[in-house]
Image (tube, coloured by chain):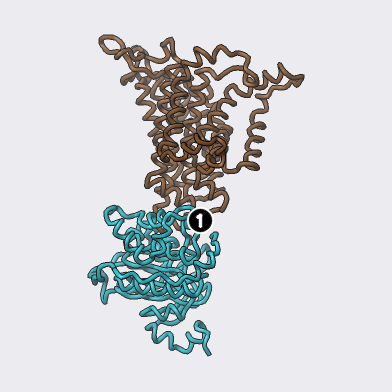
Chain colours: A cyan, B brown
Amino acid sequence: MSEQTPPPERAAESPAPQPETQAPPQQQRANGGRDGVILEVTDIHTYYGSIHALKGISLQVREGEIVTLIGANGAGKSTTLRSINGLNNPRKGRIVFQGKDITNDPAHSIVKMGISQSPEGRRLFPHMSVLENLEMGAFQRTDRQNFKEDLDRVYALFPRLAERKTQRAGTLSGGEQQMVAMGRALMARPKLVMLDEPSMGLAPIFVERIFEIVKEINQQGTPILLVEQNAMMALDVAHRGYVMETGHIALTDDAKALAKNEQVQKAYLGMD
Amino acid sequence: MERVKGRSGMGAAGRGWNQLPERARTLIPATILILLAVLYPWYHENWLAEFTNVPVIINFPSVSTAVIVIVFVIMAVGLNIVVGYAGLLDLGYVAFYAVGAYTAGWLASGHFQQVSFHFGSAGISRDLNGIHVNVWIVLLAAGLLTALAGIIIGLPTLRLRGDYLAIVTLGFGEIVPVFVRNGDNLGGFNLTAGTFGINPIDSPGFGEGLNGAWGGLPVNFQQSFIREKLFFYAALALLLITLFCSVRLRESRLGRAWIAIREDETAAAAMGIPLMRTKTWAYALGAFFGGIAGAYYASFKSGAFPSEFYFNISVFLLCMVVLGGMGSVWGVVTAGSILAWLNVEGLANIGTYLKRQTPLDFEVAKYQFGIYGVIIVLMMLFRPTGLIPERRRKLEMEEGVQDESVYGASR
């Protein structure tokens, strides 16, 4: 990843103003399973070669929720996302999305079903422009007429991207790159968005802005599965959370409760 | 277009040029080049052919040399789809050339003596045995069959990445000539005529109606007095079609997917690009043009021989792509023309010239692959992005790309 440091004045700018106009209010989609469960992961085991990375992970995401997955480096958070999106299919266990088994589906058909993501390390196409990156996000869609509408929605969320749409993605600052990655994920018109460490390597002012946008995307009706190392911020925006430790789920609870949990406070929030 | 600006010593003309819309700046040079190419047989005959003692190159390439050059350029443009657009290193492209050439051999020659099948064949006596399909149809069939071969080779290999893919394609490039050489007795069936090769192969043509040739079009290229010219124009038409398809493909949705895979395979997969299908398309389309060129060349030479399908052809074509600038259609055409000409007669001519003018006494043509090697090394040192680099590819060469295998990690 070639990340250039932003010019100082750009980083110091205040976050872009909140867009007034928002996409139409969320409609409760009725296509989820019981209790509005949209994604159900049951006891998955994923391997990298012979390394047993996930040792039985189960989690759920319901309609309208932000669910966060927190834990230390190497706990298996990103691997969990890679298992769900088909980049590393699990060897055992079951992943059901909107009532359909997607455990062994390839990545492209999972995107087509409505799970899109902002991958770890953002993974933009650095030599494409911002607009081209956003177009790649809508790659698997065939409804070209809605493309403009979605583009406007992304630009409303991230006004800065509209200003920089012809700029090469590789030359953006880290925060702007994260915006492109999130915008790109939204261009797929997802039914579930997975964000992998959106705050990684960003200036504090950008981190706050990114989490505000996460909330906003959710309020517009999209459930979010959020992987974060910044546990405090993540638990602040999320409804529920899962704490991962070396391939297991160690704890799960409401986000508020987790934030108050002594163990969590000690291990992840840096409190005594 | 920055480079043009840099040379603005040209003054007003240069500035006016930069103000033209982008489309015009591409179309005007392209039109001039196409015109120069189309008129080549005419001004070669009336003007260039008179020079028989040109410094260094001795004489200008004949029309028949130009046909071979064009055929190789078509193959290079096809390979550019695989290597340049999709970023898949293919060291066995000669296999596609061979499949194309042998398809022409099977469908338009007397090779299968046991049958007599004529379909729209132009200027071929009905009494001749063998399969004689109209060569234009054969070209298309060769393209399709080669594309199929590309898919068959691609399906097991395209899960591999980078060097591994190169090695496997290298293997396939070796298997095909060996198969062809030993294909004269497949359980008693003579498929490829072994080391003898298949010849003669029919020539293209437009055939005859009840009232003689259609609208004055040549009945059969081989029997015409202007055989070379006819082959030249048909080759040029094929090249233009290839170029058109190649440029359009790059701008298409598929082309964008290739670039995405080239830049970051994992991210491409995460965007919903079906990796296998997209890469296989690159293989199939690249192979398609290789097959057409192979079939056309076989028809031009009137034969398909296993001795032509060696590894060095694959490398030679790859040199054209690398030298021209991976992904850059115009660069590949330029480098392909130069290298193919050097290979056909340029080096020999230069050698003759050196012998005449200097006391040095050695055959330059003997050292051809050494010379290409030196050219490649020098290019990599001084201009690694190629003669006419593609904008995006140039940035990638300078800044690097994400390259990580998606497959094989979990099982």
**Image quadrant where residue A181 sits:** bottom left
Chain of the residue displaying label 1: B
Above-or-below relation of B84 to A254: above
User: Residue, x 36% and y 62% (percent of image)?
Assistant: A155
Q: Where is residue B75 in the image (x, y as percent from the top left)?
A: 48, 32
Q: Can residue B350 be seen in this view?
A: yes
Viewed as shown, does residue A236 lie left or right of A113?
A: right
**Image quadrant where residue B126 sits:** top left
Above-or-below relation of B129 to A135: above
User: Residue, x 37% and y 47% (percent of image)?
Assistant: B253
Q: Position of residue B220 (x, y in %)?
A: 38, 14
Q: How many discs appear?
A: 1
- Outermost residue to the front: B12
Query: Badge 1: few (under 14), some or many (20 or more) residues near its Cα, within 10 Å?
Result: some
Which sits in the foreground, A58 or B373? B373
> What amino acid is at disc 1?
Ser
**Image quadrant where residue A3 sits:** bottom right
Above-or-below relation of B39 to A60: above
Above-or-below relation of A193 to B118: below
The residue that label 1 is drawn on is B405
Under circle 1, the secondary element is: loop
Viewed as shown, does residue B47 lie left or right of A131?
A: right
